[in-house]
Amino acid sequence: MVDLEPIWLSLKLALITVVVLAIVCIPMAFYLNQWKSKAKFLVEAFVSLPIVLPPTVLGFYLLVLFSPNSFLGGVLATFNWQLVFTFQGILFASLIYSLPFMLLPILRGFDAVPQHLYNLSYTLGKSKWQTFIHIILPNIKYSVMTSFILTFAHTMGEFGVILMIGGNIPGETRVASLAIYDEMEALNYSNAHTYSFILFVLSFTIILLFKYIGRKGYGLDKSIF
């Protein structure tokens, strides 16, 4: 019988990644949208780097950064906190690796909001916080939903960065993509088919959900990046 623990671990990782990045990226995207500095494009380029950076490169540098021999790894070790080869480690790696998939759609949503909505809200006596909550966020809800879907799907398919920083520890860091690799290596094609089919169904469902939101919204396929 196929062990479903890697599937549940992948779902857990993806859900936590979405929640944490949503908390971080919504205010971050709003700040970047309002920021008028000439250095803005450099910041956007930096946070977009994981899109094109090979995951093994990111995983390697995270492994070096958090290894016990590094300064940061040594500091963490004094508090008995280890990120290498732990679920916390692959979660941190996922947060960095999936950051642009959460941030950029939301940022494009903020960019699409006309300035006169801000001015009208301020004229009516609304504070910046009230304007943000009651006026701006409802106008970018489809961009936010798109970012959730993209981040979840991206995290479910992570392989290289997870393998580098987390290894392949059953019950701790062995996510579904690594389980497929293990079963292929062991020539257990039946189990590999099962894992692959589950991920296929999840991926297809995500695509359908994305398309549905795109039809209900305003053409999200054009507003991702």
Image (tube, rainbow, N blue to C red):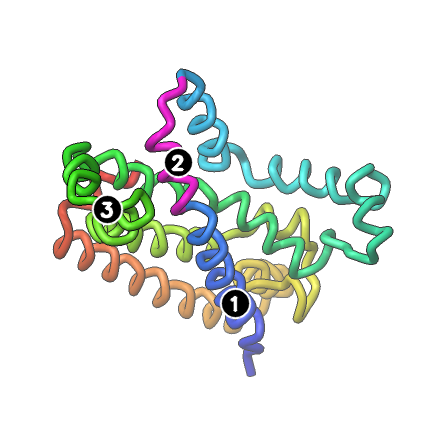
Q: Amino acid at mark 1?
A: Lys
Q: Which percent across, then down, holds residue 213?
A: 20, 57
Under circle 3, the secondary element is loop
Residue position for label 2: 31
Q: Which residue is mark 1?
A: 12
Please say whether residue 74 is visible from this viewpoint.
Answer: yes
Percent x, y of residue 164: 67, 47
Provide the secondary structure element on which disc 2 rests. helix
Q: For the stretch drawn in magenta, what is the main secondary structure?
A: helix
Q: Is residue 180 above or below residue 83?
A: below
Q: Which range is magenta? A: 26-37
Which amino acid type is marked by label 3?
A: Lys
N-terminal of the pair, mark 3 or mark 2, is 2
Q: Count residues near mark 1 (Cα–Cα under 10 Å), then give few for <14, some for 14-19, many for 20+.
A: some
Q: Quadrant of the C terminus?
A: top left
> Which residue appears at 65% of the width and 61% of the height?
87
Mark 2 residue type: Tyr
Q: Is residue 154 left or right of residue 12?
A: left
> For residue 35: magenta?
yes
Disc 3 target residue: 126
Locate residue 206, reporting x and y percent. 31, 60
Q: Is residue 128 above or below residue 188?
A: above
* Separation (CA) of disc 3 from disc 2: 18 Å
